[in-house]
Amino acid sequence: MSGRTHGPARPERTCIGCRERAAKRDLLRVAVVGESCVPDLRGTLPGRGAYVHPDTVCLDLAVRRRAFPRAFRARETLDTADLRGYVEQAHRE
């Protein structure tokens, strides 16, 4: 026996800010549009996606660690102003 419980499979992703694994539904998918990181609320934007907890602490960690350019394999820095605005707005509610 493997010791693994046999429940329904739930997708997990890793937050690029704090590096903790969490259920996919608890994280915010981020995509790149042009030169900006934007929240992908429906999960339908094309291209590579990255996941972050929808709070300012994890967002600040990701920015400080330069995790967004690494996650999206970008050579230049990416603008996170739209993403920050969304997270701060969601955090207030």
Image (cartoon, grey):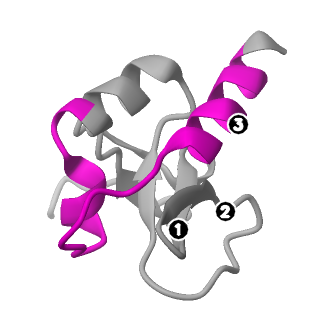
Please give the residue where the numbered disc 1 appears in the rendered image. Answer: 31
Residue 57 visible, this angle: yes
For badge 2, the amino acid type reads Asp
**Secondary structure at numbered mark 1:** strand
- Amino acid tagged 3: Tyr
In this rendering, position of residue 75 left or right of residue 18: left
Q: Which residue lies furthest to the bottom in this view?
A: 46
Residue 10 visible in image? no
Residue that label 2 marks: 40
User: Is 70 included in the stretch rendered in magenta?
Assistant: yes
Which one is earlier in the sequence, the residue at label 3 or at label 1?
1
For image coordinates 54% across by 45% down, the residue present is: 27
Please tell me whether residue 38 belongs to the stretch shown in magenta. Answer: no
Instruction: Name the residue rendered at 30%, 37% in the picture.
Output: 63
Residue bearing the label numbered 3? 86
Crowding at mark 2 (Cα within 10 Å: few <14, some 14-19, many 20+): some
Say if mark 2 contacts mark 1, CB within 8 Å.
Answer: yes
Q: Which of marks 2 and 3 is nearer the N terminus?
A: 2
Please report the bounds of the magenta region as a residue range.
Answer: 64-91
